[in-house]
Amino acid sequence: LSPSVLSKKSKSAKTGLQFPVGRVLRLLRRGHLAERIGAGTPVYLAAVLQYLSAEILELAGNAACENKKGRIGPRHIQLAARNDEELNKLFAGVTIAEGGVKSNILSQLLPKKTHTAALPTGEESSL
């Protein structure tokens, strides 16, 4: 038997990734980005895409739970991307359809906090 018959594992299974390494390689070749593409290039790119997707989905899931929703929607993805500093920088030029905008309330418009704890008697502040 030839080695190809014995080993019918996909490249994604061999690398332990969920994202399709073979498809990434095919798209890199079709894109005519370079004349030659190294063997590790699609693996690395698939791993990066998988990591970014997992990061966004985790933050979007947290946003959905905070809003008491059982399903992640575009609004939750928008909130996840805009509330994380690094993801916001990555998605600076990206518009998410049906995502809305991040609420930004000026600090001057928020109700002022009053100090309920008074200074102990007999002591004066040094201000």
Image (cartoon, rainbow, N blue to C red):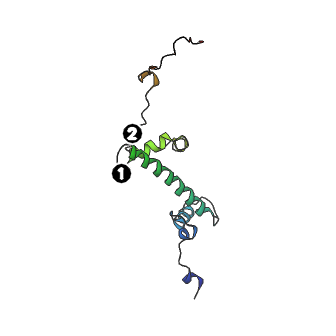
Q: Which residue is located at x 55 percent, y 60 percent? A: 46
Q: Which residue is located at x 36 percent, y 51 percent? A: 71
Which quadrant: the C terminus? top right
Q: Is residue 68 above or below residue 2?
A: above
Q: Which residue is located at x 53 percent, y 70 percent? A: 13
Mark 1 highlights which residue?
71
61, 94: nearer the viewer: 61
Q: Is residue 121 above or below residue 106?
A: above
Mark 2 highlights which residue?
100
- Secondary structure of residue under mark 1: loop
> Residue 89: where, in percent of width, then height?
55, 41
> Residue 110: where, in percent of width, then height?
42, 24
Q: Give the residue type that dot 1 points to.
A: Arg
> Residue 69: where, in percent of width, then height?
34, 47
**Viewed as shown, does residue 37 lie left or right of 118?**
right
> Which mark lies nearer to you, 1 or 2?
1
Cα distance between the residues tagged 1 and 2: 17 Å
Q: Is residue 2 above or below residue 36?
A: below
Neighbours of disc 1 within 10 Å: few (<14), some (14-19), many (20+)? few
Q: Give the residue type that dot 2 points to.
A: Gly
**Observer able to see residue 95:** no
Q: Which residue is located at x 42 percent, y 44 percent? A: 63
